[in-house]
Amino acid sequence: MSPRRSVAEALGTRSTILDRSVGIASVEGLEGLTIGRLATELGMSKSGVLGHFGSKEALQLAVLDRAGEVFRAEVWEPVVRIEPGMPRLRALCEAWISYLERGVFPGGCFFVAAAHEFDGRAGAVRDAVEARFDTWRARLLKETRRAVAAGDLPGGVDAEQLVFELHGLVMSLNHTLQLHGDRQAVTWARRAVRARLGISPAAIS
Amino acid sequence: MSPRRSVAEALGTRSTILDRSVGIASVEGLEGLTIGRLATELGMSKSGVLGHFGSKEALQLAVLDRAGEVFRAEVWEPVVRIEPGMPRLRALCEAWISYLERGVFPGGCFFVAAAHEFDGRAGAVRDAVEARFDTWRARLLKETRRAVAAGDLPGGVDAEQLVFELHGLVMSLNHTLQLHGDRQAVTWARRAVRARLGISPAAIS
DNA sequence: GACTATAGCAACCGACCGTTCGGACGCTAA
DNA sequence: TTAGCGTCCGAACGGTCGGTTGCTATAGTC
């Protein structure tokens, strides 16, 4: 009950470390996140930081989990109450774009960055990144198929094709925002998604 | 004229260093490319390598240039003789997809990787990466506008919007190939490009 | 043949990396 | 009072990083 009781003590040191780690790794990458820098920024010793995780790889996996919780809260949770199928698919895409527009992670989409950083390697971190994309893609695919089944998309629409394209639009948005800082891209992304999820004969094979 | 005359001597040591650097940096990133590793793989000393460039940043810029030459030779040169406008735009997209399909760089698109690695930083390398994307985008935009002007795309098509979408398709292809190794994506990308560059009312604002 | 420029080498520098270790501190339960 | 536990620290480890320095060997030029 001392007045010097810090946020770290209140929320738990481990949680504080992870919050800071997500911010750093979003900009510098999961490999660019160093224990020394983390310790300095948190006013801790390196061993004090590492003691909570055991190894840098374990820290990276924990950071990935934390970032996943953020993404889930920002993109998935707001949409889970919406009617499945086309309404939810539309809301999902809007939440996805908004998540980039608002700059939830300072370095853009955390997982796209992690994917590019680890796609040429092997190991637990790479596997975890891939698994997250598999999960996310499966969710999009499920809603797309529901929309097709409900007749909200033309019967000839290939769900995998459409999800591939939606993913591309969001990646293009992420890229344009991060590298060029051009916020026009938000408009382009919304317009393209609207076109794809409206009457969209282009999606027919 | 010694019998020990090596390939490096014939082609120039600097050029040999750059060739190897492009291969490494494509997988490990421009920052993950280290002078020590480069020296070891080339059977040289670190100072022997660094002497050709002066600093790591200068090496990174030279590697970026070399990668740019490769991209130009693979994607731009084969298309430069084709009739401007829609025919060239189509050929450009096909060459772009083919460049990823054939795995010209072992780590996927060199520049997309570099963009993600440097978009959160400042400096000469980041500026060079951004400049390359500006140039490439300008080329796509020029051909798109020619196609619109020639009536090969509906008059209502927004060229910037279309280029944004084409870029996304290629980025989605790159991502799917590198992270998931799913070659179906090549088909999806070709089909989507065909849809966008055919009769494509979805591109109308 | 002497002079100069270049290429490359071995050795080394300070900085930082991830990781390990022994120990100090505060809390809780016996 | 004492024992034990979780948390964190400071110091140090071996290793790698980018970069510097001084040297040698070679090639070309006067």
Image (cartoon, coloured by chain):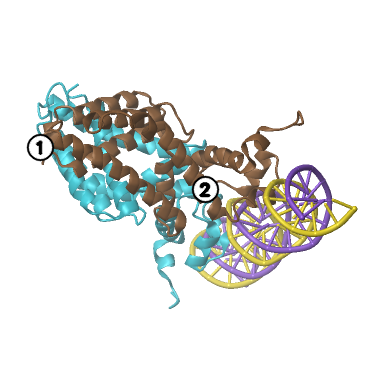
Chain colours: A brown, B cyan, C purple, D yellow
- In percent of width and height, residue B203 lies at 18, 27
- In percent of width and height, residue B52 lies at 52, 55
Residue A89's label in the rendered image is none
Mark 1 and mark 2 in contact (Cβ < 8 Å)? no
Q: Which residue is mark 1?
A: A155
> Between marks 2 and 1, how big is the CA–CA gap?
42 Å
Q: Is A47 left or right of A152, judged from the image as shown?
A: right
- In percent of width and height, residue A192 lies at 24, 28
The quadrant the N terminus of chain B occupies is bottom left
Say which of C23 and B139 sits in front.
C23
The quadrant the C terminus of chain B occupies is top left
Residue A62's label in the rendered image is 2
Q: Could you classify mark 1 by the number of other residues whose Cα lies within 10 Å: few (under 14), some (14-19), or many (20 or more)?
A: few
The secondary structure type at the circle numbered 2 is: helix
The numbered mark, 2 or 1, whose residue comes first in the sequence reads: 2
- In percent of width and height, residue A96 lies at 35, 32
In the image, residue B122 above or below residue A34: above
